[in-house]
Amino acid sequence: MKPSDESTIYHIHIDRKTPLASTTLNIVRNDPFKISELLFSSSEQKLILTSIKAVFEIMDDFEIYSINLDNTLSLSHVMFLMSGLGSSKNSSVITQERLYSLNLTNGQIQRFAKDFAGNIRESATRPDGGVYILGQVGTNVQIYTQQSSKKYTILHHGLDGICESISLSLSPHKNSTIAFVYSSYAQAKEVYVVDSIKQLESAKVITNENRLFTEHNLPRVKTFKWTSDEDDCAIEELLHYPPGKFKSTNLPLLVLIHGGPHAPSLNQFQLSTDTWGSLAATDGYGDQFLDEIRYEPLTRPGKDILSGVHRLIQDGIVDLNRLAVVGYSYGGFLNNWLITQTTNFKAALSGSGSVDYVSALGTMKFPPLIDYLMGGFPWDTSDIYAKLSPIYQLDKVRTPTLIVTGEVDIRVPPGQNFMLERARHYLGVPVQLLIFPTERHSFRNNPWHGKIKVREELKWLNKYGHQN
């Protein structure tokens, strides 16, 4: 195996008995495959891990392993989430995240929350044998419980917003302390605790890490709903008003397109420099809604975006002469397509997008995504590839575009962005390409890169986005 296909698990021991804590690093195990997820069960002294391949060819081609650290106890079950894109009888299928339980003694797998129509984001096993589930419906993520895979899923009403990183005390009692991170449009992330699942509406905050945000006049947010011009489907998104401008009219508009392609826009407080996130094919609105972009992955959600912008203009909320669009990853895919369909956007910010889906299929880390979105390979649906690849329509573009990409991005290789920049240069349309060294699809290697990216994007918007 190549070195890049191997993984090493380390155990770090931190000695806190001395004033200056010392650390000892030991190798637990070397494995000839990449590790996707790692779970440590302290009570059973076991590591549970999943393997993953560098290039996804078959979505169900992964394994779950357990490592016994002391050979004295056994772990009976482990809960895991299944990725939403897979294959069934030689055809691609798409679902929201689902929760399963694997019995490590007999290999039996059971699906939990089968009656839940939303998207499952996290879970935590309860001491009494049940499970806590963080389930997303629309823009909110709430806490649910289920006693067993054969029982119904029960919603426990709490605060509107997003619950994440749920954890609970290892108490044998049913009323174990529950801790979770909560945030909303108006509330930055903090840790909350309750002694009972019935106390969610009065959860106690125990941290104050983001108090700085309470000292500033922040944007206010409301849900904006409209009816799609395509099929009268109800669409909802989040409308962020500038500070002090809540419910004002004739405002500039920056359309932020989520990635994924199924990543949702949520009722949460989040800092993000490269991935923004409900249009067609968004998690939290059911499997059917998720699947509606197959064969038309740009035209369908693109029309939803344009119809939403049109509605905002009709309602007098937005100024037609001050429109801009931004998208990263799949949002970049849509961004690159939208600017071939309209000249109304005065500026565009395109991050790690694609312009030619034939070459993307052959170079991306995740070819099943292109296969699924286009309904097959180029030799199966060549008309769809040609129709949806922006490279063939870039002569229509008049929107000044800033392009950003990571130097070593293998999810959406930089070559796609080179093609977009070169075409714009030949056509004489204002364009700038920023390549961030050592960065992959998400900018994680150098925290300054995210700051520089946002700084340059704001400069671009100030230069082009507000022109009449």
Image (cartoon, rainbow, N blue to C red):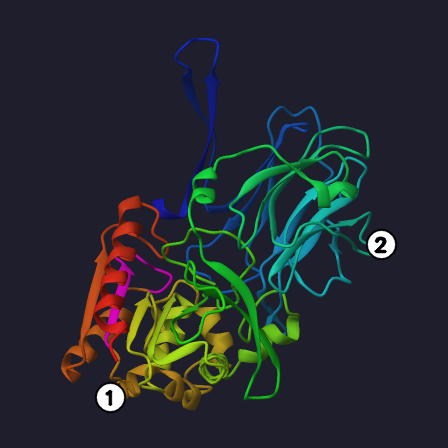
Quadrant of image for the C terminus: bottom left
Foreground mark, 1 or 2, reads 1
**Where are the magenta residues, as a range?**
400-412
Residue at the outermost bottom position = 383
Q: Is residue 345 visible?
A: yes
Across the whole image, how many numbered discs are drawn on residues? 2
Mark 1 and mark 2: span between their CA atoms? Answer: 57 Å
- Please name the residue shown 25% across and 52% down the image: 452
Residue type, mark 1 in image: Asp
Q: Position of residue 284 (x, y in %)?
A: 62, 65
Q: Quadrant of residue 251?
A: bottom left
Q: Residues within 10 Å of mark 1 (few under 14, many from 20)?
A: some
Q: Is residue 72 above or below residue 442?
A: above
Q: Position of residue 299 (x, y in %)?
A: 46, 84
Residue denoted by label 2: 151
Q: Is residue 446 visible?
A: no
Q: Nearer the viewer, residue 175 or 393?
A: 175
| Nearest to N terminus: mark 1 or mark 2 | 2
Q: Position of residue 220 (x, y in %)?
A: 49, 59
- Please name the residue shown 29% across and 87% down the image: 392
Q: Nearer the viewer, residue 69 or 277?
A: 277
Q: Which mark is residue 329?
A: none
Q: Which mark is residue 395?
A: 1
Q: Nearer the viewer, residue 180 or 213?
A: 213
> Does residue 403 show up magenta in the picture?
yes
- Please name the residue shown 23% across and 73% down the image: 464
Badges 1 and 2: C-beta atoms under 8 Å apart?
no
Residue at disc 2, secondary structure: loop
Q: Position of residue 467 (x, y in %)?
A: 24, 76
Residue type, mark 2 in image: Lys
